[in-house]
Image (spheres, rainbow, N blue to C red):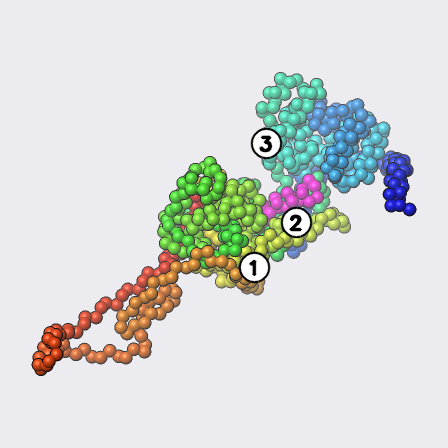
Amino acid sequence: MPRRARTRRRWYRRPLALLLAVPLLVGGFAAVTLFFYFFTSVPLPTDIGASPTVILDANGGEVGTLQAETSREDVALDELLDDLADAVLAAEDSGFHSHGGLSLPGIFRAAFRNVTRGQISQGGSTISQQYIKNVTRDDERSVLRKVREAALAVKLERQYSKDEILGFYLNSIYWGRGAYGVEAAARAYFARPAVELTVAQAAQLAGLISAPSAFDPRENPEGAHRRYRYVLDQMVDSGWLDPARAGRLAVNPPAARRARNVEFKQAPYFLQLVAAELERKVGADEIYSGLVVTTTLDMDVQRAAEQAYDEAFVQPGIRPSGALVAIDNASGGIRALVGGKSYARSQLNLAQASRQPGSTFKPFALAAWIDEGNAPESWFDAPAQITYTEAELEAELGRDQPDGGWDPENYGGAAFGEMSLRQATEQSVNTVYAQLALQVGPDKIRRMAERAGIHSRLAAVPSLVLGTSNVKPLELAEAYSTFATGGIRHRRHTVHEVRRGGEVLYVDRARGERVLSEQVALTVTDVLRGVIESGTGTAADIGRPAAGKTGTTQNNGDAWFVGYTPQMTAAVWMGNVNNNKPMEGEFTGGSLPAETWAAFMSDAMEGEEAADFPPPPGGLEIVRPSPEPEPIVCGDGEIASEGTDGVEQCVPDPDASPSPSPSPVVTAEPAPEPSPSPSPSPEPSPEPTPEPTPEPTPEPEPTEDPVPPPTEGSGDGGGG
C-alpha cells in the first residue's frame, strides 16, 4: 500500500480518539467531584491554630522556637464592624453573596493564565474555596486538589449560611506573624481586639491575606501601602466606601507594630533567617504548625563567634557595631551568625545590611583578570593617584560616562613605583586595580562577582573595582566560599530538614555548582594567602593555611575582613549602623576586623585538621614581566649576594686573599735617559705613576620592588 494512504488513515483516527476521550474525561471529572461531595465532610475551624515550631542546631540541640504572639480566638461576625467584612470581601471575593461557592469567571480566567503559562500558577478561588484550602492545609498545586476544593466549597454553601461561612473564614484565615483568625491578627499588628479595628486598619489587614509576609507593613512598607490603596479602591468600586473618605484614608495608612514572633534562647539573628527560609520552603502559614526544624547552626561555632564579637566591642572607644557570619564551605550551611550587639534593642540583622565593601571587592576583579588567562605576576605602575578624564574613560570602555572622570588614589596617598598585581593585592593598592578595571572591564567584574555569589545589584562602572556598590556580609561570605572550594558555589542556607510528627516536609538536597574554573579560584586563593602572610591582613594570621582580604571604605566608614580556611569562610564587618559616619582613629580592615576574624577562627577551627589549599595549576600569561634590576657593582674583596629580602647586596668575598699590610708610600724616581740610537726621536720618559686612590664601595641599588612593609590598613583602599 502506498505510504500516502497509510498516513491519511492515521490522520482520520486521531480526532476519533479525541472525540471518544472527551466524554470519558468529563465522566471521570464528574465522578471524582461527586465522590468528594458525598464522601468527604466539610471541615470546621475548631482545630485551626498556631503551635510553636522548635528549632534545633546541626547536632540536635534546641536553639529556640518560632511562635505566634497571640493564639487563635473566635469572634462572632455580628460583633465585628461591617467595614472589616467589606474590606475582606473587596480584597478577596467581591461576588461572595452572589455565587454558590464557585466563581466561573474566576475559574476561566485562572485556567486561561495557567494554560498560557504551562503550569498551575493562579487559582480562581472564592472565599469558600480558600476556607476549604486553609482548614485542610493542602498546598499541592494539582487538578485533583482543585476538584476537591470545588466539591467541598459547594457542599459548604449548601450546609451553612453566607454569614456563617464568612465567620468561618475570618476566624481561620492566616494573616501572617503566626496569627490565625482576625482576633489574633488585630492584636499582632495593632495591639487591639478585632472589634475595635478602624476602617483603615481593616483595609490594611485585608490587603495582607493574599501574601502576608510579602505585604507586612513593617517589612515592606511600599508593598503594604499599594495593597492598602487597592483595598480602598475596591471598596469604593463596590459601593461600600465613600470616595472622599477613601482619599483621606489613602494618604494616612495605619501604623503597624513590630513583629515579636521569635522566642530565642540563643542565636536570635540566625532564627530570623530560619523563619524567612521556612516561608520559602514550606509556606508562611505552615511556620507555626508544630514543626521541628533541624538547621545548619553549630552552637560551638556560634559561641566562638559571639565571644569574638563581644571581645571586639568591649574595648574602650569602640562605638560602631558590626556583623560576623561563618559558612561551611562543603555545603553552604551557615554555621554561625551574629547580626548586632543586642537583639532585644534592635532586630535589624546587620549580616543582611547593605554596605560598601571597599577593597574586599578586589578579588572579583582579580578573578576576572585570571579568567582571561593573565597571571597575577603581571606588573603595573602604582602611582599615588591616577586621573582619568571623561573622554579617556569613554575611549577605554567604548561607551558614555555620565558620571564624568575618575581620580582613584591609594590609601594615605602612598606611591609604590612598579609592582606586580600579586603585590598590589597584598598591599591593597587602588591605582593598580583601577588600571586593571579598565583592562578587564566593569561588566566582566560585575558578572564574576555575581557568579561567585553576590546577589545585590551592582553598578558596572570603573569604581566598582574599589567596592562602591553595596553588598551584604552574607553575600561576601558566600562568594569567598566559592574561592575556597576551588570554584564550586554552594548557596548559603539555614534549614537542613523540616518535620511535622513523623512526616518529612523538606530535606535540603542542594548540590554545589561549578561557577569558576579551578585555575581561577585556586590562583585567587594563592594570592589572598599573601594578604595574611605579608600584606595588610597580617593581624588575621591564625597559624594555619588561610586566605582573605581587608577592606576599608573612604573616610573609614566601613571596615571589613573576609577570609577562609579550606573548611570554613567567615566575614566580619564593622561600621556605624544608621549612617556612614567615619569611625574614629585608624580603623581599617587590617586592624580590629582582622583581629576579630582571627580570634573567632582560631577558636572555631580548634581540633580541626590544618588542611592546606591545593596549589594553583599555573600556565597563565604574564602580561608585563618584572623589570630587570640594574647589575650591582661591588668593590675589591666583595661579591654580590641575594639577601633575605631578595635584594642583591655587596658582602665580603670569603675566597679573597687577605689584604697585605699597608706599605710606606715611595715617591717614583724619574727613569734614566735611554742611550742614543738611530731610531726616531725618542718619546719622552713617562711621568712617575702615583699609587691609585681606591674608589669608595658603591651603595646597593634600590630594589625594583619598592613595597614598604605592611602596616595596619596600608594601602587598604577607599571606595573611590
Residue 87 found in image quarter: top right
* Spatial separation of the CA atoms under disc 1 and disc 2: 23 Å
Q: Secondary structure at mark 3?
A: helix
In screen coordinates, is 371 left or right of 98?
Answer: left
What amino acid is at disc 2?
A: Val
Q: Position of residue 46 (x, y in %)?
A: 78, 36
Q: Which mark is residue 495?
A: 2
Q: Position of residue 292 (x, y in %)?
A: 70, 48
Q: Position of residue 62 (x, y in %)?
A: 65, 51
Q: Which residue is mark 3?
A: 222
Q: Secondary structure at mark 2?
A: strand
Q: Position of residue 415 (x, y in %)?
A: 36, 51
Looking at the rendering, the stretch of residues picked out in magenta corresponds to 266-284
The kind of secondary structure the magenta stretch mainly shows is: helix
Mark closest to the chain's N terminus, 1 or 2: 2
What amino acid is at disc 3?
A: Glu
- The answer to whether residue 670 is visible is yes
Q: Which residue is mark 1?
A: 566
Residue depicted at 44% across the width and 40% down the height: 581
Task: Assess whether residue 155 is covered by the magenta stretch.
Answer: no
In screen coordinates, is 160 left or right of 247?
Answer: right
What amino acid is at disc 1?
A: Pro
